C-alpha cells in the first residue's frame, strides 16, 4: 500500500489522506511535491540479489542429491582409489594403455580394510603394479593382493575376517639395489593370534609368492638389512617360548630373525651380526627374572633371559641368576623331550623332566641356544633328551 510522510509530524499516513490523523495537518497543493517524494510503493517482485542466493542454494541441493545417489549405486563403474599424498607415476597396461597410479615407496605401507575400501585399490612400486581387491564368503572378507610386472603376475590372499579388520600391504627391498618386493600382513583375529605374513618378489623373469607363516601378536616392521650382510631381515620373536614356561601374558621370548633366500625362509638369529638384539633382551628379561614379584612372570622371563645370554657369551651367569630367581612352586606343564626324532613323540619315548631348570636346559638345547655338551656348574639335570643342534632352519623346521 502506498504511503506518504506528514511534513509537520513526520508520521506515515495513506497517500490519499487529506488530513494527517496524528497532528491534523491538511495536505495542500503547495505540498504536492513533498507528498509525491514521500510516496513509497510496496515491492511487487524479489530483488536480483535474492534471486541469485536462492538459485545458488537450489544448485547446491541438486549437487548433494546427485553425489549421494552416485555413492549408493554399487553398479556404477568408478576409477581406482587414489592417494593425493602419493605422487602418481605413469605405467602401461598389457594392452599398451597408459595409466597413472599413486606410488608406494620402499619402506612404506598401505592400510586396507573392506569397510573403508569398497573398490579396487591400485598402487605403483617401481615396475610393479599392486592391485588390492577382496574375496567374500559366508565367514567374512579377505584381501586379495595381485602384483604384476609386465606379463608376470602373482597373487596373495589374506585372512578371512570381518570387514573392519585392517590389513597391511608394504614394499621393501630384499637385497640392496634389487627390485621391490611386496609384503601382505593379514591378521586372523583372536586374543593373540595370528598375523599371517606373505610376500611377492622377483624370481628370474617372473614373480613368486613366499609364505613366511603366522606369528603371534600385531603387525611386524617391514624387513630391512640391519646386519649389513646384504639381505633384508624380518625381526620377530621365538614363539616357541610362548606358553612353554608360563601363561602367554607373562611369557618373554628372545629375538628371532628370518631371511628370505632363494625362495626359502631361513632362521639366521644365531649369527653374531644380531648380538645387539640379544643383549637388549638380556637386559629386559634379566631384570624381570631377578626382580619381579610375580613368580609366573619370573619363570617366563628367566627362560628368555638364559636363551638370550647364551647368544651373548654370558650363559653361566644367567643360569646362576635363574637358579636364584625362578619360582619352583608354580604349577605348569613344562616342555617334554623325546628319545627319538619324530613330529609327534610316542608316549613311550616321552621324557618328562624333574622341574623347571631341567626342562629349561633341555628346551634350550633342542632349540639350538645351548650346545648339547654344555652342563651348568652344580648338580646335573635329572634327564636330558636326545637331540641334534639346529643352527639355521628351513621353513618346515621354522614353523
Image: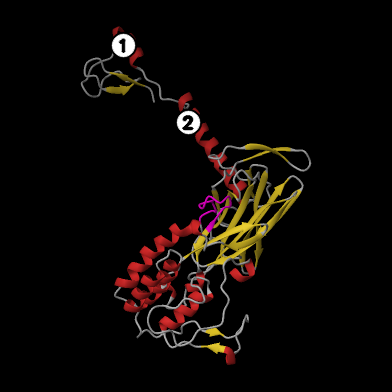
State the image coordinates of residue 371 (x, y, percent, origin top left).
Answer: 50, 73
Q: CA distance from mark 2 to mark 1?
A: 36 Å
Residue under numbered circle 1: 34
Magenta span of residues? 221-234
Q: Nearer the viewer, residue 393 or 88?
A: 393
Which is more N-terminal, label 1 or label 2? 1
Horizontal arrangement in the rendering, residue 9 relative to residue 386 (left or right): left
Mark 2 nearby-residue class (10 Å; few <14, some 14–19, many ≥20) = few
Toward which corner of the image does residue 1 lie, by quadrant? top left
Q: Nearer the viewer, residue 159 or 333?
A: 333
Q: Quadrant of the C terminus?
A: bottom right
Q: Which mark is residue 190?
A: none
Toward which corner of the image does residue 289 lie, by quadrant? bottom left
Measuring 52% from the left and 69% from the top, which residue is drawn there?
Answer: 193
Q: Nearer the viewer, mark 2 or mark 1?
A: 2
Label 2, secondary structure: give it: helix
Above or below, comparing residue 270 to residue 341 in the picture: above
Q: Which mark is residue 53?
A: 2
State the image coordinates of residue 35 (x, y, percent, origin top left).
Answer: 32, 14
Above or below, comparing residue 116 to residue 270 in the picture: above
Horizontal arrangement in the rendering, residue 320 relative to residue 208 (left or right): left
Q: In this rendering, does residue 47 appear at all? A: no
Task: Give yes or no for contact between labels 2 and 1 (Cβ–Cβ under 8 Å).
Answer: no
Magenta stretch, overall SS: loop
Residue 61, magenta (yes or no): no
Mark 1 nearby-residue class (10 Å; few <14, some 14–19, many ≥20) = some
Label 1, secondary structure: give it: helix
Above or below, comparing residue 157 to residue 251 in the picture: above
Measuring 29% from the left and 10% from the top, which residue is drawn there?
Answer: 31
Toward which corner of the image does residue 287 lie, by quadrant? bottom left
Residue 225, magenta (yes or no): yes
Amino acid at each position: 500500500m502506498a504511503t506518504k510522510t506528514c511534513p509537520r509530524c513526520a508520521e506515515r499516513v495513506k497517500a490519499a489522506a487529506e488530513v494527517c490523523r496524528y497532528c491534523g495537518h491538511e495536505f495542500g497543493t503547495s505540498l504536492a511535491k513533498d507528498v509525491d517524494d514521500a510516496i513509497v510503493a510496496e515491492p511487487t517482485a524479489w530483488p536480483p540479489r535474492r534471486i541469485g542466493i536462492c538459485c545458488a542454494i537450489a544448485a547446491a541441493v541438486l549437487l548433494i542429491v546427485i553425489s549421494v545417489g552416485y555413492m549408493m549405486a554399487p553398479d556404477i563403474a568408478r576409477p581406482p582409489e587414489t592417494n593425493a599424498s602419493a605422487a602418481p607415476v605413469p605405467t602401461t597396461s598389457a594392452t599398451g594403455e597408459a595409466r597413472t597410479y599413486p606410488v608406494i615407496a620402499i619402506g612404506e605401507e598401505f592400510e586396507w580394510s573392506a569397510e573403508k575400501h569398497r573398490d579396487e585399490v591400485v598402487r605403483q612400486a617401481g615396475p610393479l603394479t599392486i592391485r588390492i581387491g577382496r574375496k567374500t564368503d559366508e565367514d567374512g572378507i579377505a584381501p586379495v593382493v595381485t602384483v604384476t610386472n609386465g606379463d608376470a603376475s602373482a597373487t596373495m590372499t589374506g585372512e578371512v575376517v570381518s570387514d573392519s579388520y585392517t590389513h597391511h600391504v608394504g614394499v621393501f627391498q630384499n637385497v640392496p639395489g634389487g627390485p621391490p618386493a611386496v609384503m601382505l600382513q593379514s591378521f586372523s583375529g583372536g586374543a593373540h593370534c595370528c598375523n599371517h605374513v606373505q610376500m611377492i618378489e622377483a624370481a628370474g623373469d617372473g614373480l613368486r609368492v613366499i609364505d613366511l607363516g603366522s606369528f603371534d601378536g600385531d603387525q611386524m616392521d617391514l624387513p630391512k638389512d640391519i646386519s649389513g650382510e646384504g639381505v633384508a631381515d624380518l625381526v620377530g620373536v621365538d614363539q616357541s617360548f610362548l606358553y612353554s614356561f608360563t601363561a602367554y601374558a607373562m611369557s618373554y621370548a628372545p629375538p628371532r630373525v628370518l631371511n628370505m633366500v632363494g625362495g626359502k625362509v631361513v632362521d639366521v638369529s644365531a649369527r653374531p651380526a644380531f648380538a645387539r638384539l640379544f643383549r637388549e633382551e638380556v637386559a629386559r628379561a634379566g631384570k624381570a627374572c631377578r626382580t619381579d614379584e610375580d613368580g609366573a612372570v619370573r619363570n617366563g622371563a628367566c627362560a628368555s633371559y638364559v636363551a638370550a645370554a647364551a647368544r651373548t657369551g654370558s650363559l653361566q651367569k644367567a643360569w646362576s641368576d635363574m637358579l636364584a630367581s625362578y619360582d619352583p612352586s608354580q604349577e605348569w606343564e613344562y616342555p617334554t623331550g623325546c628319545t627319538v626324532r619324530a613330529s609327534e613323540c610316542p608316549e613311550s619315548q616321552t621324557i618328562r623332566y624333574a622341574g623347571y631348570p631341567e626342562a629349561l636346559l633341555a628346551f634350550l638345547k633342542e632349540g639350538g641356544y645351548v650346545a648339547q655338551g654344555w652342563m651348568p656348574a652344580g648338580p646335573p639335570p635329572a634327564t636330558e633328551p636326545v637331540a641334534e643342534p639346529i643352527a639355521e632352519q628351513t621353513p618346515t623346521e621354522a614353523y
